[in-house]
Amino acid sequence: MQSIPELMTMLREGTKHLRSMAQKLEYPWKPDESDPRVLHNNYARNLVTAYVSRFSNLSDGLLDAIEKENYLVYALNGRAMIENVATLRYYVQHEDLGKFRQVYQRLRESIRDNQPIEWDWSEHDEYTAFKNLAPRVAHLIRTGRNTRGKIPEERAGAWLAVTSNKFEDFWREQDRAQPGAPADARKSAARL
């Protein structure tokens, strides 16, 4: 078992590395970036930078509190570190986020490669999975709460209904049935 001075030395070294990492990782935020891929990568880099900086600052605060024997500040910094690690762990391991990431990656790759996705109808399995996951992940990000339950499921149901193709033929038939509808409108409806 390590002694307290050895643990303090290890914490100081770790904090020094965190501080160095935070300084090297500073990326300016560029919200006006036109390339979605570059914007996404910039956002991810900024998140990593923010968390590394946060842990660096908390570690510095922890060391300072120990050296000054200010145990209230020590406890608050320690608690903040634990809460941040627990939050990151929760989001990293959350099943819906992992699934959504895979679907989102498929979309990104198809856009990057200029390849169509085979989601040619509203009930396609992958498209349905995406439509079910999107409201749940939005709920998780917005509230930090579980993605299962009444509100996320209602939103997913609404999203599925709004994006369904079940009314597609109905509107085509209505357009064709209207005797006063312009011929161009009827032709464009037929092309849908």
Image (cartoon, rainbow, N blue to C red):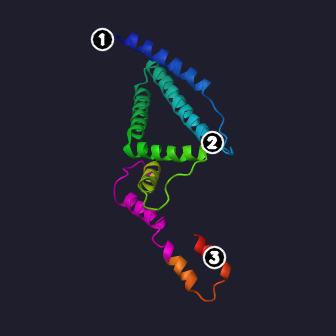
Q: Which secondary structure lies at badge 1? A: loop
Which residue has dot 1 on it?
Answer: 1
Which residue has dot 2 on it?
Answer: 39
Q: Quadrant of residue 183?
A: bottom right
**From the viewer's perspective, is residue 77 above or below residue 64?**
below
Q: Quadrant of residue 43?
A: top right
Q: Quadrant of residue 84?
A: top left
Query: What amino acid type should be assigned to the residue bearing mark 3?
Result: Lys
Q: Position of residue 38 (x, y in %)?
A: 63, 39
Could you give the CA–CA distance between mark 1 and mark 2, rounded to whole angstroms? 47 Å
Could you give the CA–CA distance between mark 3 and mark 2, rounded to whole angstroms? 40 Å
10 Å crowding of disc 1: few (<14), some (14-19), many (20+): few
Q: Which secondary structure lies at badge 3? A: helix
Residue 146 on the magenta span: yes
Q: Residue furthest bottom?
A: 179
Q: Considering only order in the chain, which callout, 2 or 3, is on the residue closer to the N terminus?
A: 2
Quarter of the image for the C terminus: give it. Answer: bottom right
